[in-house]
Amino acid sequence: MHNKKKVAVYVDGFNLYHGLVNLSKPYLKWLNLHSLAEKFIDTRTESIEKIYYFSAIATFMDRDTISRHRTYIEALETMGIEFVEGNFKNKLLTYKNKHLEFKWKKHEEKETDVNISIYMVRDAIKGIYDKFILITNDTDIVPAVKMARQENRTLQFKLLTPPTLEEYDSLLNAIKPGTSAKLTIGHIQHSLLPEKITKSNGKIISVPNQYREMASKTFK
């Protein structure tokens, strides 16, 4: 079919990650975002033109965790998915009562919700795409959704809430008259990346051992 509707996908990486962690199946993190998003479009009339993956490298974590995340980003990039990087900042928290006081450091992800918001609004104004798919349950992007709709009245929305995370009314209302769905473990299990991916330069990207060991029969 000619003139398919153009779809852009905006993935809140850590929001999705936390939803997947709660499933207690680490191999599900080796997720093919393109395959997942395609499950929620009509491929006869719609085409995914762009996918943004918004996340940040948790450089304060152990080396293996950082390596797995970088490997995953590299795998996504082979599919034309654009990684938009935020960062983590240290936040000093204090607890105090009559008898004691103690402080601890917390690492807080910054910029992701802002990045999603500005990319969405920019794309809405440009009018390149006919439909936005949002993978998040972060209500901080509600104002951006409203602004995008205000700037582009014909824009359609689809909200996908990560598995195990709550659907919030403010987000559901913001996308109206768009539609929404809750991602399930079934959606994820049927949207995994292949065990090995060969880049254009010949380099082979392999699924991290920790994921392969968890699901040796899952990958095809």
Image: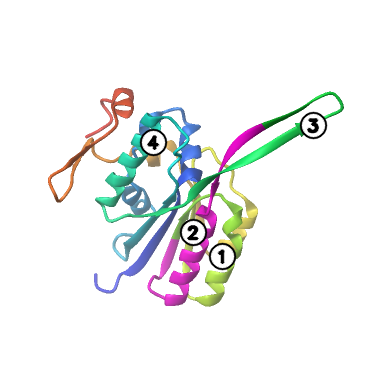
Q: Could you tell me how far apart the alpha carbons at marks 3 and 4 are, in whole angstroms? A: 34 Å
Q: Could you tell me how far apart the alpha carbons at marks 2 and 1 are, in whole angstroms? A: 8 Å
Find residue 70 and report its horizontal and vertical position in percent: 34, 41
The secondary element bearing badge 2 is classed as: helix
- Circles 2 and 1 in contact, beta carbons < 8 Å: yes
The secondary element bearing badge 1 is classed as: helix
Give the amino acid at mark 2: Ile
- Circles 4 and 2 in contact, beta carbons < 8 Å: no
Q: Could you tell me how far apart the alpha carbons at marks 1 and 3 are, in whole angstroms? A: 37 Å
Q: Tell me the residue that label 3 is attached to.
A: 96
Q: Is residue 176 visible?
A: no
- Circles 1 and 4 in contact, beta carbons < 8 Å: no
Work out whether 81 lies above or below 72: below
Give the amino acid at mark 1: Ala
* Rendered image: mark on residue 116: 2
| Nearer mark to the viewer, of 2 and 3 | 3
Please state the extent of the stretch shown in magenta in the rendering.
Answer: 104-132
Precedes in sequence: disc 3 or disc 4? 4
Q: Is residue 76 left or right of residue 109?
A: left
Quadrant containing the N terminus in the rendered view: bottom left
Find residue 27 and report its horizontal and vertical position in percent: 35, 31
